[in-house]
Image (cartoon, rainbow, N blue to C red):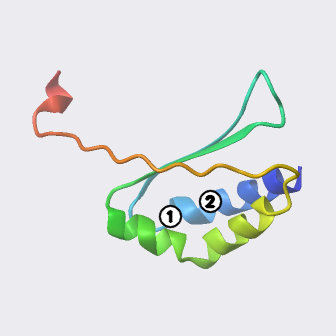
Amino acid sequence: MELSQTIASLIGFIRTEKGCRRRDFCQSIEDEDRLFLLEEWDTQENLMTHLKSEHFRVLRGAMNLLKEPYEMMFHTAFHPAGMEEI
């Protein structure tokens, strides 16, 4: 519950950070203790700036309170020119 409250309080600030395209916070319908935080950044540079930010430090601190270890995954995607027309 504390982690959810922390994330909810940070989402508005992080969405306004340079390069943040998307930030969604979800809960599994199968396991209410399973939470997902999805972020999309326009460049790796802006993501790295975010990962060094005070907002992210607060989030990491809250995640350290979890009973079980958390998993953080990074995926890189690119969108070739012209793909938006398909």
Extreme residue toward the left, this view: 82
Q: CA distance from mark 2 to mark 1?
A: 7 Å
Amino acid type at image mark 2 = Gly
* Mark 2 burial class by Cα count in 10 Å: few <14, some 14-19, many 20+: few
The kind of secondary structure element at disc 2 is helix
Q: Residues within 10 Å of mark 1 (few under 14, many from 20)?
A: few
Residue bearing the label numbered 2: 12
Q: Quick one: 20 or 69, which is closer to the camera?
A: 69
Q: Is residue 55 above or below residue 69?
A: below
Report whether 75 appears left or right of 80: right
Residue at image location 15% in from the left, 39% down from the top: 80
Above or below, 13 against 67 in this view is below
Q: Is residue 33 left or right of residue 20?
A: right
Pick whichever, 67 or 84, lies toward us.
67
Circles 2 and 1: CB atoms closer than 8 Å? yes
Quadrant where the image shows the C terminus: top left
Left or right side of 84 for 8: right
